[in-house]
């Protein structure tokens, strides 16, 4: 679907042959971390692809850089910081929940709470109004009686 | 000549839309029946004219008339016929014409089958539909005219983007457009009802099938697009949270909310204002989607700068229709008095909760999609919002929806008994938790995604089963099973669609949790393991296609010495657009897909090869198809087919409370 847009924009999306065999690290645990990190980093020159999916040369360089840092013993966050200091927060697919970024992360839960509170209040008010208009105990008993007379046939 | 006729028909359609959008409105306000009666023939005329224009453009593509700038830019004589035809809508101008064809088609349907609507409501609905058509016809003619000729026609065309030369994608846009545009009917009904100042069960009975049809089309369109991405893009992803995907997903979510809340209006005459608001928003999101796709403002700021005229025009349309409708809503919503009342624990409340979760989910997708734009405008921060954000911020709402769904579906109208419902669902809950625990035990050391997905999927699917059995009434199981066959189609539709959601939830979790990937260099004749399978790269040859050259590998997949499949992954180059594409070879299975991709020849000999085992891949789209089938079953329910006669027989009388 996105390539549909790209085509319309007359841009060329290269279907990927992303991670090359010669990039893969020998240690599977380290490689898994590298994949996880590179899925969160955006290719700086592509249309919304992660460096893991993209086959642009710069993505390959970044994938190699990520693996280099991991082999050197960096933590995941350190590796991500390493890339962000060089390319800016544009490369982060997972925007940081700090400063104005908090709005983005809290918007959904906040709307759920607000909407939930409104719906709850409205429903309770309406339900109360009904009870006020509802049947008295005597009416209830009479109704039950009528239903009993009517039902078995 | 045919091209000029098409061009002329389009201009004439604009004039007709002008009439359709104005005179019937005046007629309805004044009670002038002659003016109101104009609406239906105008809607028919508009459809015929736009269909003629569309046919003319199709003719130009089929005959490769390169004197048309659009054809020269998007077609080629060597292109297979299927893609010459699908090339009509594989570009901005043509796709808008298709959009308009669908829009006027829906309008014409309302004119042809809406004879039983109150006269003024029908006139107003058609007029609003005419106004939408007018806006988009003006947009098409003034900023994106598909019928422009070239002074010097080229000898051959620039070809269609090879990624689009695929049967899955050839039919994906028409379905999406039918969905987007179907929501314009709900919008027109909502605005017409606001002008009328009243809605009732009959109104909901009219709106619901339109919404349902739009939602079914959107479901199929989204599923086709996702399926295409899976087999075409070459690494087996099926959803990328890309702005263009989100553009179709937001209306889908809102339409899903709308078709649930319209039930409450239809059955209980409650939630009227909210339903109207949803109908307005659903079409609003369709317009926003169109804006995102057509202007490219979100994916690339530069694309917008390249063609600001189009983006601004759509923004203007969006502003006028949404601004107008919401203002009308603010002025009139108070007059929409609710009739049915309900308790805190009831089917109505459950549907409110469903609406809340779906609306919030759509809102999260929306804010994530536009956030890069907002952040850049307000704080000058150039940032991205992608898959990790959406996975984290969107999924919880869907999980909550899935947890609540079986409970809500079993809840009776007006006043429910939560304890009773939970007792009936207890066996399913126990089964779901047991399955989750079993999966957890078997797959030690992996993420919690697998077990949770399995438990949720089973909960929703079996919950739908309990729903069906409950509808069949009491008594021995055999008698109930006998009655199941005679349940109304709406019940079958609901249960099927809900089960489909469960299947998709399970499949999405499963493929993410249990996928096996293998990347390596394979030499000719080499055998390598891929999960439980052995894969042998037998041969690689070069071949010629109709408009491309291809490097095709022959790979044999075996398991325990027995050949499972022979697959031929390709790497194609389309010379006209100088563009390589990967054609993954997939062995589709019930429990998993084997997905092989051939890459470049390596310097030291051999080829780069990617192999995947994708568990339950087909279940993703299977679930989506079930959802669409459910919608379709519900659409064929007796009450929609018979509603016309029934309402004529009972003149506008409301049952006593």
Image (spheres, rainbow, N blue to C red):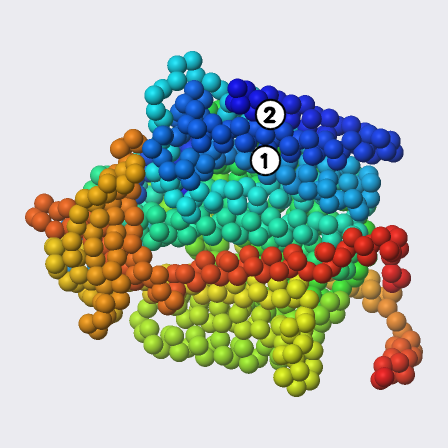
Horizontal arrangement in the rendering, residue B279 relative to residue B451 (left or right)? right
Horizontal arrangement in the rendering, residue B632 relative to residue B306 (left or right)? right
Label 2 marks a residue whose chain is B
Residue occupied by mark 2 = B10
Residue drawn 82% across the image and 62% down it: A129
Q: Is residue B59 visible?
A: yes
| Closer to the camera in the image, B112 or B375 | B112
Between the C-alphas of marks 2 and 1, the distance is 11 Å
The image position of residue A49, as x and y in percent, is 34, 43
| Closer to the camera in the image, B437 or B585 | B585
**For the residue carrying disc 2, how many other residues have a C-alpha within 10 Å: few (<14), some (14-19), or many (20+)?**
many
Residue drawn 39% across the image and 64% down it: B616
| Closer to the camera in the image, B170 or B618 | B170
Q: Which mark is residue B544?
A: none
Q: Splitting the image into 4 quarters, where does residue A46 fall? A: top left
Q: Which mark is residue B101?
A: 1
| Closer to the camera in the image, A71 or B651 | B651
Q: Are marks 2 and 1 in contact (CB under 8 Å)?
A: no
Q: Mark 2 and mark 1, same subunit? A: yes
Say above or below: B250 vs B75. Answer: below
The image position of residue B102, as x and y in percent, is 59, 39
- Callout 2: SS: helix
Residue at the top extreme of this rendering: B151
The image position of residue B347, as x and y in percent, is 69, 66
Residue at the bottom extreme of this rendering: B476
Say above or below: B276 vs B444. Answer: above
The earlier-in-sequence mark between 2 and 1 is 2
Q: Splitting the image into 4 quarters, where does residue B345 fall? A: bottom right
- Callout 1: SS: helix
Label 1 marks a residue whose chain is B
Q: Is residue A10 visible?
A: no
């Amino acid at each position: 679907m996105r390539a549909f847009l790209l085509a319309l924009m007359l841009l060329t999306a290269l279907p990927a042959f992303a991670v090359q065999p010669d990039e893969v690290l020998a240690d599977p645990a380290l490689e898994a971390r590298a994949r996880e990190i590179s899925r969160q980093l955006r290719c700086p020159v592509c249309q919304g692809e992660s460096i893991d999916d993209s086959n642009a040369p710069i993505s390959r360089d970044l994938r190699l850089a990520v693996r280099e840092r991991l082999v050197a013993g960096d933590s995941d966050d350190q590796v991500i910081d390493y890339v962000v200091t060089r390319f800016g927060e544009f490369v982060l697919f997972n925007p940081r929940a700090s400063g104005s970024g908090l709005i983005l992360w809290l918007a959904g839960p906040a709307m759920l709470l607000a909407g939930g509170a409104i719906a709850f209040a409205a429903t309770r008010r309406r339900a109360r109004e009904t009870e006020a208009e509802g049947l008295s105990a005597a009416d209830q008993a009479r109704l039950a009686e009528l239903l009993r007379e009517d039902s078995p046939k | 000549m045919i091209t000029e006729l098409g061009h002329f028909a389009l201009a004439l359609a604009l004039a007709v839309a002008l009439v359709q959008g104005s005179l019937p409105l005046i007629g309805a306000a004044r009670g002038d029946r002659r003016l109101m009666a104009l609406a239906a023939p105008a809607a028919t005329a508009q459809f015929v004219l736009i269909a003629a224009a569309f046919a003319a453009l199709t003719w130009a593509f089929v005959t490769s008339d390169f004197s048309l700038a659009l054809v020269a830019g998007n077609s080629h004589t060597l292109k297979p016929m299927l893609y010459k035809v699908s090339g009509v809508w594989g570009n901005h101008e043509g796709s808008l014409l298709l959009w308009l064809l669908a829009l006027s088609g829906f309008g014409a349907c309302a004119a042809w089958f809406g004879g039983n609507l109150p006269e003024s409501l029908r006139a107003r609905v058609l007029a609003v539909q005419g106004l939408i058509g007018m806006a988009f016809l003006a947009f098409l003619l003034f900023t994106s005219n598909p019928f422009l000729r070239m002074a010097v026609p080229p000898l051959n065309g620039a070809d269609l983007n090879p990624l689009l030369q695929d049967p899955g994608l050839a039919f994906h846009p028409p379905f999406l457009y039918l969905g987007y545009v179907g929501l314009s009917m709900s919008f027109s009904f909502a605005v017409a009802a606001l002008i009328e100042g009243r809605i009732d069960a009959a109104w909901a009975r009219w709106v619901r099938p339109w919404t349902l049809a739009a939602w079914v089309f959107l479901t199929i369109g989204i599923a086709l697009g996702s399926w295409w991405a899976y087999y075409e893009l070459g690494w087996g992803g099926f959803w990328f949270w890309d702005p263009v995907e989100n553009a179709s997903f937001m209306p889908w979510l809102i339409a899903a909310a709308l078709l649930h809340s319209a039930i409450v209006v239809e059955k209980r005459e409650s939630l009227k204002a909210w339903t109207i608001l949803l109908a307005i928003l659903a079409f609003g999101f369709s317009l926003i989607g169109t804006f995102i796709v057509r202007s490219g403002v979100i994916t690339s700021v530069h694309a917008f700068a390249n063609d600001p005229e189009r983006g601004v025009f759509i923004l203007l349309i969006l502003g006028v229709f949404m601004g107008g409708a919401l203002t009308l809503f603010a002025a009139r919503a108070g007059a929409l008095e609710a009739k049915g009342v309900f308790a805190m624990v009831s089917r109505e409340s459950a549907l409110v909760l469903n609406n809340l979760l779906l609306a919030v989910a759509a809102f999260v997708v929306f804010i994530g999609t536009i956030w890069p734009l907002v952040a850049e405008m307000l704080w000058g921060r150039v940032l991205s919002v992608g898959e990790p954000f959406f996975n984290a911020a969107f999924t919880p709402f869907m999980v909550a929806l899935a947890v609540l769904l079986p409970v809500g579906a079993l809840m009776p109208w007006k006043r429910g008994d939560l304890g009773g419902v939970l007792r009936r669902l207890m066996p399913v809950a126990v089964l779901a938790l047991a399955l989750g625990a079993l999966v957890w035990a078997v797959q030690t050391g992996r993420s919690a995604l697998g077990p949770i997905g399995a438990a949720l999927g089973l909960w929703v699917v079996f919950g739908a089963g309990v729903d069906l059995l409950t509808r069949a009434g009491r008594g021995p199981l055999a008698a109930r099973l006998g009655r199941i066959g005679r349940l109304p189609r709406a019940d079958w539709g609901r249960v099927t669609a809900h089960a489909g959601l469960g299947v998709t939830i399970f499949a999405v979790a499963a493929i993410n949790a249990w996928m096996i990937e293998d990347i390596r260099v394979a030499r000719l004749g080499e055998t390598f393991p891929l999960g439980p399978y052995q894969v042998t790269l037998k041969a690689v040859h070069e071949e010629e296609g109709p408009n491309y050259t291809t490097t095709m590998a022959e790979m044999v997949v075996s398991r325990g010495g027995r050949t499972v499949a022979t697959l031929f992954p390709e790497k194609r180059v389309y010379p006209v657009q100088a563009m390589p594409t990967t054609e993954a070879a997939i062995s589709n299975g019930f429990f998993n897909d084997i997905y092989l991709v051939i890459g470049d020849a390596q310097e030291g000999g051999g080829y780069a090869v990617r192999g995947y085992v994708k568990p339950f891949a087909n279940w993703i789209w299977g679930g989506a198809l079930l959802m669409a089938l459910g919608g379709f079953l519900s659409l064929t329910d007796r009450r929609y087919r018979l509603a016309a006669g029934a309402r004529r027989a009972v003149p506008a009388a409301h049952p006593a409370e």
